[in-house]
């Protein structure tokens, strides 16, 4: 734990002391909805058969470089396949539609009286 002088110096510069107990597990619960389980599919590689050491080789045998069968797994998949972007289902909310009316300043006019009568009849 830093001393009071160290804390005051940090606060004056705008740097805050890192307090690991400030957040609890409850604060991170909302982030769990975006956790995406990774697929458990793995590439199975078969080991090559064992060959005897150099004493078993014939001197006239042509030695060829082995073909590179092992390829990086990232060359066959895109970033979206490795870690896809979380998607939210499209939800449509049926909002009540308002009756669009004229904008007027309501003073003692026939229009105001008409609106007042409509309101009174609804009640």
Image (cartoon, rainbow, N blue to C red):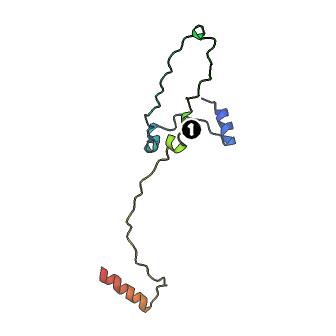
Categorize mark 1 by other alpha carbons within 10 Å: few (<14), some (14-19), many (20+).
Answer: few
Residue depicted at 39% across the width and 67% down the height: 95
Question: Residue 61's x, y, as percent?
Answer: 61, 15
Residue depicted at 32% across the width and 83% down the height: 120
Judging depth in this view, the residue of 44 and 78 nearest the camera is 44
Task: Specify the quadrant that holds the N terminus.
Answer: top right
**Image position of 97 with respect to 28: above or below:** below
Task: Specify the quadrant that holds the C terminus.
Answer: bottom left
Q: Quadrant of residue 39?
A: top left
Question: Residue 114's x, y, as percent?
Answer: 38, 88
Identity of the residue furthest to the front in this view: 60
Residue depicted at 42% across the width and 87% down the height: 112
| Residue annotated with mark 1 | 75
**Image position of 100 with respect to 92: above or below:** below
Judging depth in this view, the residue of 10 and 70 nearest the camera is 70
Question: Residue 17's x, y, as percent?
Answer: 61, 36
Residue depicted at 51% across the width and 21% down the height: 48
Q: Secondary structure at mark 1?
A: helix
**Image position of 31 with respect to 6: above or below:** below
Identity of the residue furthest to the bottom in this view: 110
* Picture mark count: 1
Horizontal placement of 17 versus 23: left or right?
Answer: right
Judging depth in this view, the residue of 101 and 113 nearest the camera is 101
Q: Quadrant of residue 109?
A: bottom left
Q: Quadrant of residue 26?
A: top left
């Amino acid at each position: 734990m830093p001393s009071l002088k160290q804390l005051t110096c940090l606060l004056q510069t705008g740097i805050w002391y890192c307090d690991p107990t400030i957040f609890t597990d409850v604060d991170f619960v909302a982030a769990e909805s975006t956790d995406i389980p990774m697929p458990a599919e793995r590439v199975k590689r078969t080991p090559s058969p064992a060959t005897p050491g150099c004493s078993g080789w014939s001197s006239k045998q042509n030695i060829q470089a082995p073909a590179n069968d092992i390829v990086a797994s990232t060359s066959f998949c895109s970033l979206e396949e490795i870690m896809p972007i979380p998607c939210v289902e499209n939800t449509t909310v049926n909002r009540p539609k308002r009756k669009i009316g004229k904008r007027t300043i309501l003073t003692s006019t026939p229009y105001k009286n008409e609106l007042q009568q409509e309101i009174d009849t609804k009640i």
